[in-house]
Image (cartoon, rainbow, N blue to C red):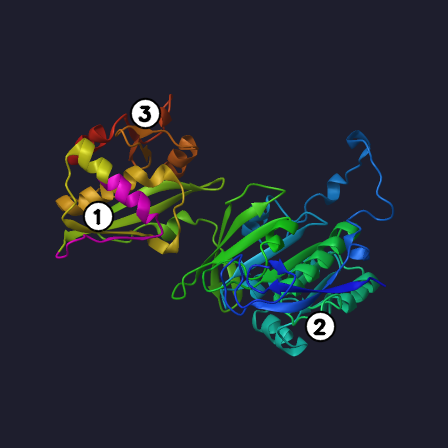
């Protein structure tokens, strides 16, 4: 049996101390340090992922089972975010706000996978009757889906070794506890050790494990930061409380691209995939309105058409307001300074409000040009026609810089009926785009002049 020793750990950041103190020197949190039992490195938990004695091997001698490399979950949007499907032996952490649909998503996934292999759904927050009630309400198939209501990691692993499921869902990791520590479930040490044992089991048995994680009020995953390091994939479930659309975004993925985006709609039958996400972000006006511009952004490998709205109004305060929803407010202030310096458009006495429609977050710089032209459209009260698509990065010297995936953005816009485009000169197609007139701008001043003639 492993030898145990006493230590003191912060429940906020996980820092360890030799004695108790009122304030953590690592994160400055008060009354967050509690006494825990820490183990030395003789416990089997520290033996690593190899079965038996670890040995050095040549990479050319490692055999891969290509037919089992990816497992389709039945939800194409989830497969896209995972990088093409679920990798056997991987650990996937899914976080999101309460009630956003994490349990619903995984229950739908397991019910689909249960048709072809053995799966196990472990709940630490609900009873088996509650899980079954939710599945029947959504009309999901119930055959071959194994359920277990438990929070004890060692007991869960014994059940898993007996049943040998290929996919396991842990809902949630914050409710799990292990005998290695005496702290309460949800503590930093319990979350860390419980996740470590589950990830080790996944690697040794080639079992795919989904871990549901809670989030803090700041929107980050609760628990130690090491939790995101030891898993293979980290997904965030996002969505507005008053919207039925849900977006799942890949923050970390060892088997695919990061920042990939999957979009769902919450219905009474569970989550439904959105096959054409650009359509839900486009405007629904009967005629063009000022301040509304359609931009072509790229989230992961998928081009998206998103409506950007801007409202510029006379400021009655000493410091004009700069408010962004879905975009970076610091970048907005910088771009307004570029607009003033290189195009002579003054907004220093105006309040500027910018919104990305549909709750989408634009994190790339390809929306700079569309944002500035939306501001100019609202300031001059000059609507932008429906058939114009805009994208491009704006530099501090007023140049329009090319962005990644320009051809894919133009093809996506042409598919939705756009006839004109304002793009960087470096993204101008050599052979053109069928049915689309492309204006390639080298500077912000050229784009503003072209905008005045629309």
Q: CA distance from mark 1 to mark 3?
A: 24 Å
Tag 1 secondary structure: loop
The quarter of the rendered structure image containing the C terminus is: top left
Q: Secondary structure at mark 3?
A: helix
Q: Check if mark 1's residue and mark 3's residue have beta carbons within 8 Å.
A: no
Q: Which residue is mark 1?
A: 291
Q: Which mark is residue 425?
A: 3
First in sequence, mark 3 or 2: give its number.
2
What is the crowding at mark 3: few (fewer than 14 residues within 10 Å), some, or many (at least 20)?
A: some
Please report the bounds of the magenta region as a residue range: 316-336
Label 3 vs label 2, nearer the camera: 2
Q: Using residue 223 as the reference point, say whether residue 397 is left or right of it.
A: left
In the displayed structure image, the side of residue 381 where residue 387 appears, left or right:
right
Q: Residues within 10 Å of mark 1 (few under 14, many from 20)?
A: many
Q: Residue 327 colored magenta?
A: yes
Numbered circle sitting on residue 150: 2
> Disc 3 to disc 2, how far (Cα)?
59 Å
Q: Position of residue 421 (x, y in %)?
A: 29, 34
């Amino acid at each position: 049996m492993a030898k145990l020793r006493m230590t003191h750990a912060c429940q906020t950041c996980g820092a360890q101390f030799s004695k108790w103190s009122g304030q953590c020197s690592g994160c400055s949190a008060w009354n967050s340090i509690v006494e825990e039992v820490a183990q030395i490195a003789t416990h089997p938990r520290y033996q690593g992922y190899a079965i038996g004695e670890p040995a050095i091997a040549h990479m050319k001698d490692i055999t891969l089972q290509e037919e089992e490399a990816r497992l389709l979950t039945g939800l194409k949007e989830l497969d896209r975010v995972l990088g093409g499907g679920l990798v056997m032996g991987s650990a996937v952490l899914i976080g999101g706000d309460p009630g956003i649909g994490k349990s619903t998503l995984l229950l739908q996934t397991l019910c689909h996978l249960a048709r072809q292999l053995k799966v196990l759904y472990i709940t630490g927050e609900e009873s088996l009757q509650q899980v079954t009630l939710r599945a029947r309400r959504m009309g999901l198939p119930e055959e071959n889906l194994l359920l277990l209501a438990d929070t004890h990691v060692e007991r869960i692993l014994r059940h898993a070794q007996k049943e040998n499921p290929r996919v396991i869902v842990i809902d949630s990791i914050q409710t799990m506890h292990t005998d290695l520590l005496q702290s309460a479930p949800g503590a930093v040490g319990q979350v860390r050790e419980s996740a470590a044992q589950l990830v080790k089991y996944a690697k040794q048995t080639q079992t795919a494990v989904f871990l549901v994680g809670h989030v803090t009020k700041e929107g980050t995953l609760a628990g130690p930061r090491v939790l995101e390091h030891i898993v293979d994939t980290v997904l965030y479930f996002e969505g507005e409380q008053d919207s039925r659309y849900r977006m799942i975004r890949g923050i970390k993925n060892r088997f695919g691209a990061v920042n990939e985006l999957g979009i769902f709609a919450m219905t009474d039958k569970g989550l439904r995939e959105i096959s054409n996400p650009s359509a839900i972000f486009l405007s629904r006006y009967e005629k063009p309105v000022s301040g509304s511009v359609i931009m072509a952004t790229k989230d992961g490998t998928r081009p998206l058409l998103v409506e950007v709205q801007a409202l510029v109004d006379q400021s009655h305060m000493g410091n004009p307001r700069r408010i962004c929803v879905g975009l970076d407010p610091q970048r907005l202030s910088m771009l307004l300074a570029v607009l003033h310096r290189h195009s002579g458009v003054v907004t220093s006495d105006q309040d500027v409000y910018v919104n990305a429609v549909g709750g989408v977050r634009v994190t790339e710089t390809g929306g700079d040009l569309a944002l500035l032209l939306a501001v100019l459209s609202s300031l001059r009260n000059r609507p932008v026609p429906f058939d114009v698509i805009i994208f491009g990065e704006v530099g501090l010297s007023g140049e329009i810089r090319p962005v990644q995936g320009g051809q894919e953005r133009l093809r996506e816009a042409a598919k939705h009926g756009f006839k004109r485009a304002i793009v960087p000169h470096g993204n101008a197609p050599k052979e053109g785009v069928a049915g689309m007139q492309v204006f390639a701008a080298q500077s912000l001043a050229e784009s503003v002049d072209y905008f005045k003639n629309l």
